């Protein structure tokens, strides 16, 4: 085995709807997810120390069995019938607790790298099944581009990507518990529902303005009730010229879509003056 690295890309939700609930309590969703260029870098290489060793550049990220990337390596070796000593290095740029699949994309990267390093013992379907055992977003993160996801997120269908544009991502200092947010949503009436079909038509037509207008997330309303700053950040992005803006996933990150790089960079700089983190990214097709 040789040292191997890859980029692990973040995602945003262009639309996110809750369509029901399974008997086991999992919520059923319908969402259009898109890969963006904001990414971590994941490296795997042989290690002298027995078992799996993980290191991360962020001191508050766990480096043991609590880390989903660590779990991905454990599960891969279990399914592949191997025992290896490996070192995993995570260089994180994707904000933690942002609703951008930062942990899931690292886990997917570990699966891809290990499968390649050991001669592809797992086929595409087996790798997808393995990813789903780790989490609902991990199968999406195995590839890049835009997908319509249903079920708990594992039923993936390819869709056209966003036209060329710029995306400003803003992350407040707090995170939001996905579990608590789902509980809050279960206790309130949802007033705004995404028009997923219209979003897919806009993507097919390469109509950036229409796609930006159709951004929608049913989880944002409940999140903003608990954390009003989310709504304030979204409104500020619109004031700074975003064609559309929304919270991604279960939050707490908010993003805005811009047609021009200059306008997007000016918006990023303006947002960075507030007590938030801000990044400039592009859609990955």
Image: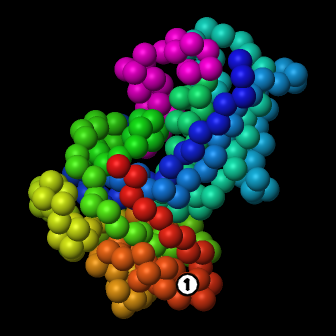
Looking at the image, how many numbered discs can be counted on the residues?
A: 1
Q: Residue at x 59, y 61 (%)?
A: 95
Asked if 251 appears above or below 2 in the picture, the reply is below
Magenta stretch encompasses residue 129: yes
Q: Residue at x 64, y 27 (%)?
A: 73
Furthest residue toward right: 48
Q: Residue 50: give x, y in percent of width and height.
A: 84, 20
Q: Is residue 175 left or right of residue 25?
A: right
Q: Residue at x 75, y 56 (%)?
A: 58
- In this view of the protein, which residue sits in the foreground, 43 or 220? 43
Residue receiving disc 1: 269
Q: Is residue 245 visible?
A: no
Magenta stretch encompasses residue 80: no
Q: Residue at x 67, y 31 (%)?
A: 4
Q: Is residue 49 visible?
A: yes
Q: Residue 68: give x, y in percent of width and height.
A: 61, 39
Asked if 223 appears above or below 102 in the picture, the reply is below
- Which quarter of the figure is the N terminus placed in? top right
Magenta segment range? Answer: 115-137
Q: Is residue 108 left or right of residue 25?
A: right
**Hey, which quadrant is residue 201 in on the image?**
bottom left
Asked if 152 appears above or below 243 in the picture, the reply is above
**Hey, which quadrant is residue 72 in on the image?**
top right
Q: Is residue 42 left or right of residue 241?
A: right
Q: Residue 21: give x, y in percent of width and height.
A: 27, 46
Q: Secondary structure at mark 1?
A: helix
Main SS of the magenta part reads helix
Asked if 134 appears above or below 80 in the picture, the reply is below
Q: Residue 23: give x, y in percent of width and height.
A: 30, 37
The scheme the figure's colours follow is rainbow
Q: Is residue 129 left or right of residue 212?
A: right
């Amino acid at each position: 085995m040789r040292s191997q690295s890859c980029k692990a890309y973040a995602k945003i939700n262009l639309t996110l709807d809750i369509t029901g609930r399974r008997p086991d309590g999992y919520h059923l969703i319908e969402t259009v997810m898109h890969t963006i260029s904001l990414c971590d870098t994941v490296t795997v290489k042989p290690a002298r120390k027995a078992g799996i060793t993980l290191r991360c550049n962020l001191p508050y990220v766990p480096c043991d069995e609590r880390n989903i990337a660590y779990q991905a390596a454990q599960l891969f070796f279990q399914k592949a019938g191997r025992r290896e000593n490996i070192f995993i290095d995570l260089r994180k740029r994707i904000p933690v607790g942002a609703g951008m699949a930062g942990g899931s994309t690292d886990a997917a990267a570990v699966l891809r790298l290990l499968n390649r390093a050991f001669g592809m013992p797992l086929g595409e379907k087996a790798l997808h099944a393995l990813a789903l055992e780790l989490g609902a977003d991990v199968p999406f993160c195995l590839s890049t581009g835009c997908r319509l996801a249903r079920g708990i997120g594992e039923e993936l269908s390819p869709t056209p990507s966003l036209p060329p544009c710029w995306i400003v991502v803003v992350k407040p200092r707090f995170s939001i518990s996905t579990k608590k947010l789902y509980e809050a949503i279960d206790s309130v009436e949802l007033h705004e529902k995404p028009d997923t079909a219209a979003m897919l038509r806009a993507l097919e037509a390469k109509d950036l303005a229409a796609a930006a207008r159709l951004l929608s997330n049913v989880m944002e309303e409940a999140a903003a009730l608990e954390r009003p700053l989310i709504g304030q950040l979204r409104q500020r992005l619109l004031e700074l010229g975003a064609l559309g803006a929304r919270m991604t996933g279960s939050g707490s990150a908010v993003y805005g879509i811009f047609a021009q790089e200059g306008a997007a960079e000016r918006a990023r700089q303006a947002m960075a003056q507030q007590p938030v983190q801000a990044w400039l990214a592009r859609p990955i097709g």
